Image: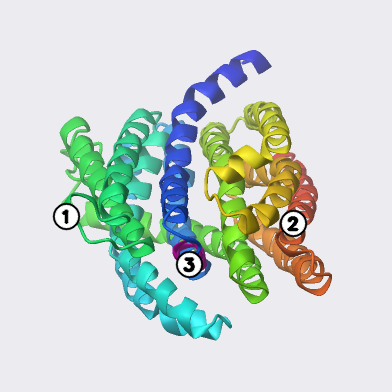
């Protein structure tokens, strides 16, 4: 394949995956925007709930991400039934992790108080967090299923059911945030309830689709004629162990990254309610372009992983380079839009002048940090396709906790630059991450596969 063929193949897989990943954030964006119009207090409660919510959620999703790594390699090697065993192991682990997160999300008041938030904000944020908890098993089951489908070249169902969840979420937000049609007026807690219901709707739909469309043998649910039941169980347990071996470092990497971003939210909380409300808006706008980058990272993971399964080193290198070119063009265009239309974008979330005065300059800074953030996540996807997961985890921890968090405290808190200083630190940490991960990828792909 030449470069043009690689670009087409990557875009064919990446486009629905990018829309699906973007759908994860558009649910949060709709919640943030619709909660913001219910008042600054409700927006602050929703924003502060993200401090424990996002790291824990991404750790759970990271455990599921091993599905992409292992299933794409099995697909590339032609071991189709093996990928089915991987999916069933992923379902078991997603359900267990979702139930654990459900319990952790009901300790929100204690965790927010421990993070230095005011008692009033901690109580309100904990109510939002507890409501999100009931949707955690659904989120992880949906993630495991869509990742499996993406790894075998069927990304469209994930995109479709994510769009269904988004439509349901907006309608339910209108009911529960503002109390229309006789529903209780619940504010930020209502937004969390709407998201939880919408997540279960999408998960139920995609599970029904998988069982109705894919054969039992393809799902690892029924052994072939020559495969005894004991051998089938042994293969399933082996798939589960391999999934954990890959998923644990990916989950830790997600947790380290999300925890670093949550630290920035905590810093904003120290600066006051206006700062945390403005930073919540900017963080949401910053995360929206990140989700297409995450989708492209998934496509790079799948295509590099399939090349790895075929023992095709040059194909792995070219698949990575194609993803790199696409993300460069996309994020430069979005960053320019953020710089030119910062006022319009921030105004979608709130009409309060005091919040906008902080948010608008921070949105402009975010436009500069979008490119390095996208580049680092694509590099991580390429490394995971090569099964290089623990070194990437260590490098991300060094970049985000060794560079981003200290610079955030220095710029945002010590120098009192507020939300713009916090966002600038994100760009600093991501530039450092890109440099480290690029060197690592160059080293790993040069080895004999």
Work out how far the residue at label 3 is from the one at label 2, CA to CA, in angstroms: 21 Å
Relative to 140, 14 lies left or right: right
Q: Which residue, given by chain and number where applicable, does mark 3 sit on?
A: 41
Work out how far the residue at label 1 is from the one at label 3, CA to CA, in angstroms: 23 Å
Relative to 175, 188 lies left or right: right
Q: Quick one: SS at disc 1?
A: helix
Quadrant occupied by the C terminus: top right
Q: Which residue, given by chain and number where applicable, does mark 1 sit on?
A: 182
Badge 3 vs badge 2, beta-carbon distance below 8 Å: no
* 122 w.r.t. 150: above or below: below
* 427 w.r.t. 114: above or below: above
Relative to 117, 4 lies left or right: right
Magenta-colored stretch includes residue 48: yes
Magenta stretch?
41-49
Q: Quick one: SS at disc 2?
A: helix
Camera-side residue of 196 and 20? 196
Q: Which callout, 1 or 3, points at the residue further toward the start of the chain?
A: 3
Crowding near pointer 1: few (<14 within 10 Å), some, many (20+)? few
Crowding near pointer 2: few (<14 within 10 Å), some, many (20+)? many
């Amino acid at each position: 394949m030449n470069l043009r063929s690689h670009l087409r193949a990557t875009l064919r897989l990446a486009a629905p995956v990018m829309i699906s990943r973007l759908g994860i954030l558009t649910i949060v964006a709709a919640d943030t925007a619709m909660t913001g119009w219910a008042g600054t207090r409700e927006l602050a409660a929703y924003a502060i709930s993200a401090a424990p919510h996002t790291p824990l959620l991404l750790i759970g999703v990271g455990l599921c991400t091993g599905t992409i790594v292992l299933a794409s390699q099995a697909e590339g090697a032609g071991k189709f039934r093996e990928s089915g065993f991987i999916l069933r192991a992923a379902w078991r682990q997603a359900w267990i992790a979702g139930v654990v997160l459900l319990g952790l999300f009901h300790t929100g008041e204690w965790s927010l108080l421990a993070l230095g938030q005011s008692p009033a904000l901690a109580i309100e944020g904990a109510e939002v967090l507890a409501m999100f908890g009931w949707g955690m098993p659904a989120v992880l089951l949906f993630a495991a299923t869509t990742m499996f489908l993406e790894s075998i070249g069927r990304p469209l169902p994930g995109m479709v059911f994510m769009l269904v969840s988004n439509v349901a979420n907006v309608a339910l937000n209108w009911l529960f945030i503002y109390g229309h049609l006789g529903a209780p007026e619940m504010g930020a807690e209502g937004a969390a309830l709407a998201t939880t219901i919408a997540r279960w709707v999408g998960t139920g739909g995609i599970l029904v689709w998988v069982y109705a469309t894919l054969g039992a043998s393809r799902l690892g649910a029924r052994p072939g004629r020559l495969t005894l039941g004991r051998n089938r169980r042994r293969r399933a347990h082996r798939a589960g162990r391999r999934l954990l071996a890959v998923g644990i470092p990916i989950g830790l990497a997600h947790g380290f990254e999300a925890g670093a971003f949550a630290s920035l939210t905590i810093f904003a909380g120290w600066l006051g309610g206006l700062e945390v409300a403005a930073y919540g808006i900017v963080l949401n706008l910053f995360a929206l372009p990140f989700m297409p980058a995450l989708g492209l990272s998934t496509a790079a993971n799948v295509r590099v992983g399939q090349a790895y399964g075929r023992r095709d080193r040059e194909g792995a290198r070219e698949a990575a380079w194609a993803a790199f070119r696409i993300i460069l063009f996309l994020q430069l265009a979005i960053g320019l839009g953020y710089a030119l239309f910062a006022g319009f974008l921030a105004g979608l979330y709130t009409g309060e002048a005091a919040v906008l005065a902080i948010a608008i300059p921070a949105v402009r800074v975010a436009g500069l940090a979008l490119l390095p953030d996208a580049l680092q996540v694509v590099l991580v996807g390429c490394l995971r396709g090569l099964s290089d997961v623990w070194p990437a985890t260590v490098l991300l921890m060094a970049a985000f906790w060794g560079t981003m968090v200290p610079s955030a405290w220095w710029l945002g808190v010590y120098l009192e630059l507020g939300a713009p200083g916090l966002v600038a630190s994100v760009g600093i940490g991501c530039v450092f991450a890109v440099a480290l991960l690029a060197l690592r990828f160059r080293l790993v792909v040069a080895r004999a596969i």
